[in-house]
Image (cartoon, rainbow, N blue to C red):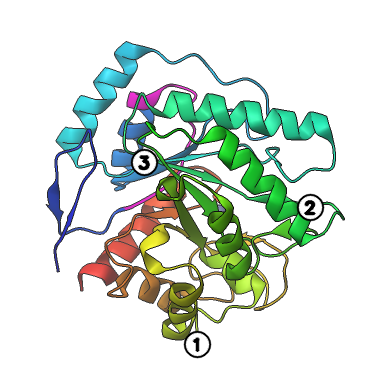
Amino acid sequence: MCYARGSEFLPKARICVLVIGCHLSISKGYLAIAQEAVSLGANTFQFFTRNPRGGKAKAIDPADVEAFHGFAAAHGIDRILAHAPYTLNPASATEKTRDFAHLALAEDLARMENTPGQLYNMHPGSHVGQGVDAGIELIADALNEALRPEQTTTLLLETMAGKGSEVGGRFEELAEIIERVELRDKMGVCLDTCHVWDAGYDIAGDLDGVLREFDQIIGLDRLHAIHLNDSLNPRGARKDRHARIGEGLIGFDALSAVTRHPLLRSLPFYLETPQEDPSGYADEIARLREAWEG
Ligand SMILES: [Zn+2]
């Protein structure tokens, strides 16, 4: 089946292929990461906007961005996903940590306009003992400060495993954050298969039921991306330990079924599976493509 998808810098095209990629390093620039993605059989990719543990973002080279746009159009690269650093916690009890979250969000969203119409993903945050409701308020405050009416980026909140005091382990919590955001049309969700499994949702045994629940609480129109990961732990473990596709407790068949589901198959999928080097992703991508096309 083909779907009309597209974005501002990529022409609207009928996508008849699985849009799948993996997390890669952008340390050598946009063109280099896109070339590496294509060499792995990917037609999208995810990258950190800055060091995952925090710190400053590298300056953007306009010539590199331009070369990337040409390469992306020629190779059908679709919907790239920038990932906020893990240290970004707008729900922190510490003012300094909240200030970093506000600053990094504003800077990252401004940089994203170099590649218009793409996706930016963040872990909502951890309330560190202040309570879920206080966490939700703080996260929504940060988003209301960061989002701009003119931005072309869609900001995604990731579904979390519910480890520790993480906010976003329940679909209701993400819905409540989005509800409090004024520029709601800029907001979406990235569903992580390992995280929702660890949070207790049975995507292996009852994918339709989980999607129905997602639709009732958040709305499937908000779902813009999938992190495709297997899990080392049983459902409901709230651990968040990713496994390679088919080497965890969700399994290859159930994860392939996620990519083939009629409501999901036109979404972009991003692998964040543990690999010794990026070539390990090539095998996962090839197997998932074969099953998707079959
Ligand atoms: Zn993820």
> Residue 34: which quarter of the image?
top left
> Residue 142: which quarter of the image?
top right
Is residue 104 toward the left or the right of residue 291 in the image?
A: right
Comes first in the chain, label 2 or label 3: 3
Give the CA separation, mark 2 to mark 3.
29 Å
Report the mark closest to the observer, 2 or 3: 2
Q: Would you place residue 226 above or below residue 252 in this image?
A: above
Quick check: can you spot residue 262?
yes
Comes first in the chain, label 2 or label 1: 2
Give the CA separation, mark 2 to mark 1.
31 Å
Mark 1 Cα shell of 10 Å, populated few (<14), some (14-19), many (≥20):
few
Choose between 124 and 50: the one closer to the eye: 124
Q: Which residues are magenta?
A: 20-31
Q: Are marks 2 and 1 in contact (CB under 8 Å)?
A: no
The C terminus, quarter of image: bottom left
Residue flagged by tag 3: what amino acid is it? Ile
Q: Secondary structure at mark 2?
A: loop
Q: Secondary structure at mark 3?
A: loop
- Residue wearing tag 1: 205
Q: Are marks 2 and 3 in contact (CB under 8 Å)?
A: no
- Measured from the top left, where is residue 23 in percent x and y? 48, 44
> Residue 107: which quarter of the image?
top right
- Residue wearing tag 3: 80
- Residue wearing tag 2: 127
- Measured from the top left, where is residue 265 in percent x and y? 29, 67
Is residue 159 toward the left or the right of residue 245 in the image?
A: right
Q: Secondary structure at mark 1?
A: loop
- Measured from the top left, where is residue 292 in percent x and y? 26, 69
Is the CB atom of the residue marked by disc 3 within 8 angstroms of ligand 1's nearest atom?
A: no
> Quadrant for ligand 1?
bottom right
Q: Residue at x 82, y 59 (%)?
A: 131
